[in-house]
Image (cartoon, rainbow, N blue to C red):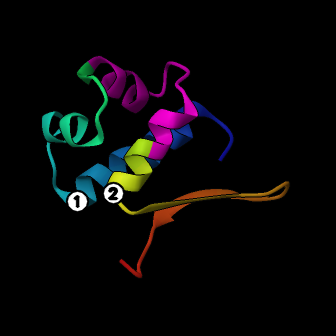
Amino acid sequence: MKSHPEVAKVLRDAISHRKVSQAQLHEEAGISQRTLTNVLSGDEDFKLSTLFALADKYDLVIASDECYSDIYFDEAK
């Protein structure tokens, strides 16, 4: 995963899987609706702190090294 659209797709899938609204998500993750919309569109750059807030709230694991990167559900939680 190397682009904002790829990250956005994973996050949209996670939101769909968790069955939460965007309104609920932005409130619970502590980010603005505008920021969430920008992140999920995949069209704009966003801060890592935003990604970490969303990952933390929805039990997503962010894994990356020089050959591999992925975001996936933490099945242990």
Give the residue displayed 52% in from the left and 42% down from the top.
Answer: 7
Between 10 and 53, the one lying in front of the other is 53
Disc 2 secondary structure class: loop
Look at the numbered discs 2 and 1 and tell me whether their residues touch, using CB distance below 8 Å.
yes
Residue 47 on the magenta span? yes
Give the residue displayed 49% in from the left and 63% down from the top.
Answer: 72
Task: Give coordinates of residue 58: x percent, y percent.
Answer: 33, 57
Residue type at mark 2? Answer: Tyr
Between 19 and 48, the one lying in front of the other is 48
Task: Give coordinates of residue 44: x percent, y percent.
Answer: 51, 18
Q: Is residue 60 left or right of residue 15?
A: right
Residue type at mark 1? Answer: Arg
Give the residue displayed 36% in from the left and 22% down from the top.
Answer: 35
The residue that label 1 is drawn on is 18
Give the residue displayed 28% in from the left and 50% down from the top.
Answer: 15
Disc 1 secondary structure class: helix
Residue 38 on the magenta span? yes
Q: Quadrant of residue 12?
A: top left
Task: Give coordinates of residue 77: x percent, y percent.
Answer: 35, 77
Q: Is residue 6 above or below residue 10?
A: above
Q: Is residue 67 left or right of residue 36?
A: right
Few, some or many C-alpha atoms within 10 Å of disc 2 (few <14, some 14-19, many ≥20)? many
The residue that label 2 is drawn on is 58
Foreground tag (2 vs 1) = 2
Between 12 and 30, the one lying in front of the other is 30
Magenta highlight range = 34-52
